[in-house]
Image (tube, rainbow, N blue to C red):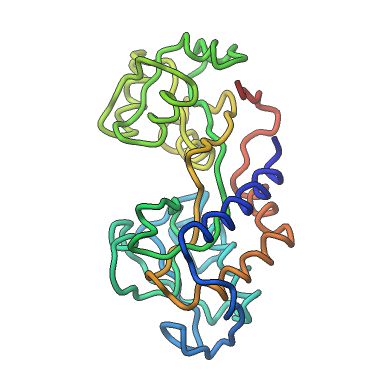
Amino acid sequence: MSYSLHTLRTLAAGVIMTAALGLPALAQDTGTVDDPRLVNPGMLTVGTGDPVYPPWMMNNAPESGEGFENALVYALAAEMGFGPDQVQWVRLTFEQTIAPGDKPFDFAIQQISVTPARAEVVGFSQVYYQADKAVIALPGSVVESAASFADLREARWGAAIGTTDMAYLENVVGVSDVAVYDDQIGVFQAMQAGQIDATVAAVPTALFATAVQIPDASIVAILPPDENDEGHGLLFEHGNPLIPWVDAALSRVIEAGTVDDLVSTWLVADPGLPIISE
């Protein structure tokens, strides 16, 4: 499946999620840079992480526009009528961003998964990206020759406790004996010690991991997204009246192919990698 089809599918899923979660209808889907709905009229105020990581944002500098998520924000801002100098960034922890209550931003972007539970206390746009999974392994691992989920189940797998990666291995691939570690660093250390053969991660996470955290390893195969993971959306204060305007602009950005282009620039692994889908 191509990334273009992924984007189309997540767009449709996001529209369904928007309706299912009772987000505001597109009755006020336009605005101006001085719109009173903005936290700071005249500026588009965007929340993100502290720090931020590549390839989502490069060099811990959201304002640079270098990276998938900050480039998307500047494209979205332009669609809404804001110039680059009219975008201001607010840096928060992930926990602060997803917590209920008042927000110091118009919306936030930080690889935030859309979930019904979160939607009870915050607002969401439609989904703008859903990642494939990547198989990460050291040279010589048995998974290098895998061609099916059945082959993958023959390997020794590890994942961090409570993560979507662990759930993916158990529920999608069907691995019954995943070795559990406290965090991803522990998983990589176990791989280097020969205790496990491989792990999985979202493709962007895997790109960063194999470039920085465990450079001896590589992505050896691509797996399909988890259908139970709705994907990433922009996060708003619950009931924020900006949602229709931002969501309509985001739809136009997606339809123009901008998200596909940004995925191809920042989030794509080697196109020659094998794809294992069943």
In the foreground, 129 or 137: 129
User: Quarter-wise, where is residue 16 in the image?
Assistant: bottom right
Picture coordinates of residue 146, whole percent (x, y): 58, 13
Residue drawn where x is 41% and y is 56% of the image: 52
- Please tell me which residue is depicted at 29% across the width and 28% down the height of the picture: 186
Q: Which quarter shows the N terminus?
A: top right
Q: Position of residue 155 (x, y in %)?
A: 45, 11
Residue located 50% across and 69% down the image: 63
Residue 117 percent location from the top left of the image: 35, 52
Residue 211, compared with residue 181, is above or below; it is below
What percent of the width, then of the height, locates residue 206?
49, 36
Residue with the most extreme right position: 256
Res. 196 image quadrant: top left
Residue at 29% across, 24% down: 180
Between 220 and 133, the one lying in front of the other is: 133
Depicted 76 relative to depicted 157: above or below: below
For the residue pair 216 and 222, the one nearer the viewer reads as: 222
Give the total number of marks visible in the rendering.
0
Q: Is residue 224 left or right of residue 228?
A: right
Q: Nearer the viewer, residue 29 or 22?
A: 22
Q: Quadrant of the C terminus?
A: top right
